[in-house]
Image: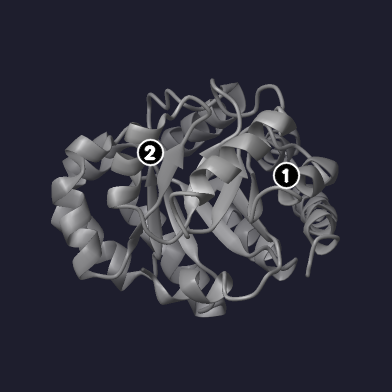
Amino acid sequence: MSLRIKKVFQNNSKKLATFTTGGDPDIKTSIKIIETIISNKTDIIEIGMPFSDPMADGPTIQLSSNRSINNGTNLNDIFSITNQIRKINNEIPIILMGYYNVIYYFGVKKFVDECKKNGVDGLIIVDLQPEEDGELFKELKKNNISLIRLITPTTNESRLKLILSNASGFLYYVTITGITGQNSADLNELERSIKFIKSHSNLPIIAGFGIKDSNDVKEICNITDGAVVGSSIVKIIEKNISDNDKMIIKINDFIKNLKLGTKIWIG
Protein backbone atom coordinates (compact mmCIF):
# COMPACT_ATOMS: atom_id res chain seq x y z
CA MET A 1 0.00 0.00 0.00
CA SER A 2 1.11 3.54 -0.71
CA LEU A 3 2.42 5.24 2.42
CA ARG A 4 0.57 8.44 1.52
CA ILE A 5 -2.75 6.59 1.37
CA LYS A 6 -1.99 4.78 4.62
CA LYS A 7 -1.14 8.06 6.32
CA VAL A 8 -4.26 9.90 5.17
CA PHE A 9 -6.50 7.27 6.78
CA GLN A 10 -4.60 7.12 10.09
CA ASN A 11 -7.04 9.41 11.89
CA ASN A 12 -10.83 9.18 12.22
CA SER A 13 -11.68 12.24 10.15
CA LYS A 14 -13.90 11.75 7.13
CA LYS A 15 -12.17 12.20 3.78
CA LEU A 16 -13.02 14.29 0.76
CA ALA A 17 -11.77 12.97 -2.57
CA THR A 18 -12.14 15.07 -5.70
CA PHE A 19 -12.05 14.13 -9.37
CA THR A 20 -11.07 16.16 -12.41
CA THR A 21 -10.04 15.01 -15.87
CA GLY A 22 -6.35 15.58 -16.50
CA GLY A 23 -5.78 18.17 -19.23
CA ASP A 24 -9.27 19.69 -19.05
CA PRO A 25 -9.62 22.38 -20.24
CA ASP A 26 -5.85 22.43 -20.91
CA ILE A 27 -2.70 21.26 -19.14
CA LYS A 28 -1.81 24.57 -17.49
CA THR A 29 -5.33 25.23 -16.22
CA SER A 30 -5.74 21.62 -15.13
CA ILE A 31 -2.72 21.99 -12.85
CA LYS A 32 -4.07 25.28 -11.49
CA ILE A 33 -7.44 23.64 -10.76
CA ILE A 34 -5.79 20.80 -8.84
CA GLU A 35 -3.61 23.27 -6.92
CA THR A 36 -6.77 25.17 -5.95
CA ILE A 37 -8.48 21.98 -4.83
CA ILE A 38 -5.48 21.00 -2.71
CA SER A 39 -5.34 24.46 -1.12
CA ASN A 40 -8.84 23.85 0.24
CA LYS A 41 -7.75 20.74 2.13
CA THR A 42 -9.17 17.98 0.00
CA ASP A 43 -7.73 14.70 1.25
CA ILE A 44 -7.32 12.67 -1.96
CA ILE A 45 -6.85 13.80 -5.55
CA GLU A 46 -8.28 11.69 -8.37
CA ILE A 47 -7.14 12.54 -11.88
CA GLY A 48 -8.96 11.07 -14.84
CA MET A 49 -6.92 9.70 -17.72
CA PRO A 50 -8.85 10.86 -20.81
CA PHE A 51 -10.26 8.07 -22.95
CA SER A 52 -12.36 8.14 -26.09
CA ASP A 53 -14.99 5.66 -24.81
CA PRO A 54 -15.50 6.24 -21.07
CA MET A 55 -18.39 3.81 -20.60
CA ALA A 56 -18.88 4.35 -16.85
CA ASP A 57 -18.94 8.14 -17.10
CA GLY A 58 -21.93 10.37 -17.57
CA PRO A 59 -22.19 13.12 -20.19
CA THR A 60 -20.36 15.71 -18.09
CA ILE A 61 -17.18 13.68 -17.65
CA GLN A 62 -17.41 12.29 -21.18
CA LEU A 63 -17.32 15.85 -22.48
CA SER A 64 -14.36 16.72 -20.25
CA SER A 65 -12.49 13.69 -21.55
CA ASN A 66 -13.26 14.78 -25.12
CA ARG A 67 -12.04 18.31 -24.42
CA SER A 68 -8.79 16.94 -23.04
CA ILE A 69 -8.27 14.54 -25.96
CA ASN A 70 -9.06 17.28 -28.48
CA ASN A 71 -6.31 19.36 -26.88
CA GLY A 72 -3.89 16.50 -27.53
CA THR A 73 -3.55 15.29 -23.93
CA ASN A 74 -1.83 11.91 -23.60
CA LEU A 75 -0.48 9.81 -20.74
CA ASN A 76 2.85 11.62 -20.77
CA ASP A 77 0.94 14.83 -20.13
CA ILE A 78 -0.94 13.20 -17.26
CA PHE A 79 2.36 12.20 -15.67
CA SER A 80 3.62 15.74 -16.22
CA ILE A 81 0.60 16.99 -14.26
CA THR A 82 1.23 14.59 -11.35
CA ASN A 83 4.91 15.55 -11.38
CA GLN A 84 4.01 19.23 -11.09
CA ILE A 85 1.56 18.54 -8.28
CA ARG A 86 4.25 16.64 -6.37
CA LYS A 87 6.47 19.73 -6.53
CA ILE A 88 3.89 21.69 -4.53
CA ASN A 89 2.57 18.91 -2.31
CA ASN A 90 4.34 15.68 -1.45
CA GLU A 91 1.75 14.44 1.06
CA ILE A 92 -1.63 14.20 -0.64
CA PRO A 93 -2.44 10.85 -2.29
CA ILE A 94 -2.78 11.06 -6.07
CA ILE A 95 -5.00 8.46 -7.72
CA LEU A 96 -5.23 7.96 -11.48
CA MET A 97 -8.63 6.81 -12.67
CA GLY A 98 -9.47 5.46 -16.08
CA TYR A 99 -9.68 2.49 -18.42
CA TYR A 100 -7.32 -0.39 -19.05
CA ASN A 101 -6.93 0.17 -22.81
CA VAL A 102 -5.00 3.36 -22.12
CA ILE A 103 -2.54 1.45 -19.92
CA TYR A 104 -2.31 -1.57 -22.19
CA TYR A 105 -1.29 0.44 -25.25
CA PHE A 106 1.17 2.52 -23.24
CA GLY A 107 2.73 -0.68 -21.85
CA VAL A 108 1.91 -2.00 -18.38
CA LYS A 109 5.44 -2.00 -16.94
CA LYS A 110 6.27 1.36 -18.51
CA PHE A 111 3.04 2.80 -17.14
CA VAL A 112 3.68 1.62 -13.58
CA ASP A 113 7.29 2.83 -13.76
CA GLU A 114 6.02 6.29 -14.73
CA CYS A 115 3.47 6.19 -11.92
CA LYS A 116 6.25 5.51 -9.43
CA LYS A 117 8.52 8.15 -10.93
CA ASN A 118 5.83 10.83 -10.92
CA GLY A 119 4.29 10.36 -7.48
CA VAL A 120 1.14 8.36 -8.22
CA ASP A 121 -0.17 6.41 -5.22
CA GLY A 122 -3.00 4.35 -6.62
CA LEU A 123 -5.08 3.36 -9.62
CA ILE A 124 -8.80 2.94 -10.15
CA ILE A 125 -9.31 1.02 -13.39
CA VAL A 126 -13.01 1.02 -14.12
CA ASP A 127 -13.14 -1.84 -16.63
CA LEU A 128 -10.43 -4.17 -15.23
CA GLN A 129 -11.90 -7.27 -13.59
CA PRO A 130 -10.07 -9.15 -10.79
CA GLU A 131 -9.73 -12.19 -13.06
CA GLU A 132 -7.72 -10.10 -15.53
CA ASP A 133 -5.52 -7.91 -13.35
CA GLY A 134 -2.54 -10.24 -12.88
CA GLU A 135 0.05 -8.40 -14.96
CA LEU A 136 -0.87 -4.95 -13.66
CA PHE A 137 -1.25 -6.05 -10.04
CA LYS A 138 2.20 -7.69 -10.08
CA GLU A 139 3.86 -4.46 -11.19
CA LEU A 140 1.86 -2.29 -8.79
CA LYS A 141 2.66 -4.50 -5.82
CA LYS A 142 6.41 -4.33 -6.58
CA ASN A 143 6.18 -0.52 -6.50
CA ASN A 144 3.86 -0.11 -3.48
CA ILE A 145 1.12 1.43 -5.62
CA SER A 146 -2.42 0.59 -4.58
CA LEU A 147 -4.98 -1.07 -6.83
CA ILE A 148 -8.22 0.46 -5.62
CA ARG A 149 -11.26 -1.66 -6.29
CA LEU A 150 -14.78 -0.65 -7.21
CA ILE A 151 -17.66 -2.30 -5.36
CA THR A 152 -21.26 -1.83 -6.48
CA PRO A 153 -24.69 -2.34 -4.88
CA THR A 154 -25.01 -5.61 -6.81
CA THR A 155 -21.74 -7.16 -5.57
CA ASN A 156 -22.48 -10.46 -3.79
CA GLU A 157 -20.36 -12.19 -1.15
CA SER A 158 -18.42 -14.49 -3.46
CA ARG A 159 -17.67 -11.63 -5.84
CA LEU A 160 -16.67 -9.38 -2.95
CA LYS A 161 -14.10 -11.91 -1.73
CA LEU A 162 -12.56 -12.02 -5.21
CA ILE A 163 -12.49 -8.23 -5.47
CA LEU A 164 -10.83 -7.92 -2.06
CA SER A 165 -8.09 -10.42 -2.89
CA ASN A 166 -5.90 -7.86 -4.69
CA ALA A 167 -7.39 -4.65 -3.28
CA SER A 168 -5.29 -2.19 -1.29
CA GLY A 169 -5.31 1.43 -0.13
CA PHE A 170 -9.05 1.89 0.16
CA LEU A 171 -12.24 0.64 -1.47
CA TYR A 172 -14.37 2.76 -3.78
CA TYR A 173 -18.07 2.08 -3.31
CA VAL A 174 -20.25 3.02 -6.27
CA THR A 175 -23.42 4.34 -4.64
CA ILE A 176 -25.66 3.88 -7.67
CA THR A 177 -25.84 1.55 -10.63
CA GLY A 178 -25.27 3.39 -13.87
CA ILE A 179 -22.99 6.24 -14.87
CA THR A 180 -21.37 9.12 -13.02
CA GLY A 181 -23.26 12.31 -12.30
CA GLN A 182 -26.72 10.71 -12.34
CA ASN A 183 -29.27 10.28 -9.53
CA SER A 184 -28.42 10.06 -5.82
CA ALA A 185 -27.59 7.32 -3.35
CA ASP A 186 -30.19 5.32 -1.44
CA LEU A 187 -28.83 5.90 2.06
CA ASN A 188 -30.52 2.86 3.61
CA GLU A 189 -29.10 0.61 0.92
CA LEU A 190 -25.71 2.30 1.31
CA GLU A 191 -25.67 1.64 5.06
CA ARG A 192 -26.50 -2.03 4.57
CA SER A 193 -23.82 -2.40 1.89
CA ILE A 194 -21.09 -0.70 3.92
CA LYS A 195 -21.79 -2.93 6.93
CA PHE A 196 -21.62 -5.96 4.63
CA ILE A 197 -18.28 -4.88 3.13
CA LYS A 198 -16.77 -3.99 6.51
CA SER A 199 -17.62 -7.48 7.76
CA HIS A 200 -15.16 -8.78 5.15
CA SER A 201 -12.47 -6.08 5.00
CA ASN A 202 -10.64 -3.59 7.20
CA LEU A 203 -9.86 -1.29 4.26
CA PRO A 204 -11.37 2.22 4.42
CA ILE A 205 -14.37 2.76 2.17
CA ILE A 206 -15.12 5.97 0.30
CA ALA A 207 -18.21 6.37 -1.84
CA GLY A 208 -18.71 8.07 -5.17
CA PHE A 209 -21.21 8.57 -8.01
CA GLY A 210 -24.18 10.90 -7.54
CA ILE A 211 -22.56 13.01 -4.80
CA LYS A 212 -23.13 16.59 -5.85
CA ASP A 213 -22.82 19.01 -2.93
CA SER A 214 -21.88 19.53 0.71
CA ASN A 215 -25.13 18.06 1.99
CA ASP A 216 -24.55 14.88 -0.03
CA VAL A 217 -21.01 14.70 1.35
CA LYS A 218 -22.38 15.05 4.89
CA GLU A 219 -24.92 12.26 4.40
CA ILE A 220 -22.41 9.92 2.77
CA CYS A 221 -19.72 10.58 5.37
CA ASN A 222 -22.12 9.67 8.13
CA ILE A 223 -22.05 6.12 6.75
CA THR A 224 -18.67 5.73 5.01
CA ASP A 225 -15.07 6.84 5.54
CA GLY A 226 -15.32 9.52 2.89
CA ALA A 227 -16.96 10.84 -0.27
CA VAL A 228 -15.87 11.46 -3.86
CA VAL A 229 -17.14 14.42 -5.85
CA GLY A 230 -16.38 14.66 -9.56
CA SER A 231 -19.12 15.64 -11.99
CA SER A 232 -20.10 18.77 -10.05
CA ILE A 233 -16.52 20.06 -10.26
CA VAL A 234 -16.26 19.23 -13.94
CA LYS A 235 -19.53 21.11 -14.56
CA ILE A 236 -17.96 24.24 -13.09
CA ILE A 237 -15.08 23.85 -15.55
CA GLU A 238 -17.50 23.38 -18.45
CA LYS A 239 -19.69 26.36 -17.55
CA ASN A 240 -16.73 28.74 -17.11
CA ILE A 241 -14.48 27.49 -19.88
CA SER A 242 -14.13 30.96 -21.41
CA ASP A 243 -13.08 32.62 -18.14
CA ASN A 244 -10.34 30.76 -16.25
CA ASP A 245 -10.16 33.29 -13.42
CA LYS A 246 -13.88 32.96 -12.73
CA MET A 247 -13.57 29.17 -13.00
CA ILE A 248 -10.83 29.00 -10.37
CA ILE A 249 -12.77 31.25 -7.97
CA LYS A 250 -15.90 29.11 -8.31
CA ILE A 251 -13.96 25.88 -7.82
CA ASN A 252 -12.22 27.36 -4.79
CA ASP A 253 -15.55 28.28 -3.18
CA PHE A 254 -17.17 24.96 -4.12
CA ILE A 255 -14.38 22.81 -2.63
CA LYS A 256 -14.31 24.93 0.51
CA ASN A 257 -18.03 24.27 0.94
CA LEU A 258 -17.70 20.55 0.17
CA LYS A 259 -15.08 20.20 2.88
CA LEU A 260 -17.57 21.47 5.45
CA GLY A 261 -19.58 18.33 4.83
CA THR A 262 -16.73 16.22 6.21
CA LYS A 263 -15.83 18.43 9.17
CA ILE A 264 -19.17 17.80 10.83
CA TRP A 265 -18.23 14.17 11.27
CA ILE A 266 -14.69 14.49 12.59
CA GLY A 267 -14.42 12.36 15.71
- The picture places residue 123, in percent across and down from the top left corner, at 37, 52
Q: Quadrant of residue 77?
A: bottom left
Q: Amino acid at mark 1?
A: Ile
Q: Determine whether, in the image, residue 267 is placed left or right of residue 89.
A: right
Picture quarter with the N terminus: bottom left
**Which one is in front, 153 or 206?**
153
How packed mark 1 is, by other alpha carbons closer than 10 Å (few <14, some 14-19, many 20 or more), is many
- The picture places residue 239, in percent across and down from the top left corner, at 75, 33
- The picture places residue 187, in percent across and down from the top left corner, at 73, 33
Picture quarter with the C terminus: bottom right
Residue depicted at x 82% and y 54%: 261
| Residue topped by disc 1 | 220
> Is the residue 75 above or below the residue 234 in the image?
below
Q: Determine whether, in the image, residue 138 is placed left or right of residue 29.
A: left
Q: CA distance from mark 2 to mark 1?
A: 21 Å
Residue depicted at x 59% and y 43%: 194
Q: Quadrant of residue 49?
A: top left
Q: How is the image coloured?
A: one colour
Helix, strand or loop at mark 1: helix
Q: Is residue 25 visible?
A: no
> Is the residue 186 above or below the residue 10 in the image?
above
Residue depicted at x 59% and y 44%: 195
Q: Amino acid at mark 2?
A: Leu
Q: Is residue 181 visible?
A: yes
| Residue topped by disc 2 | 160
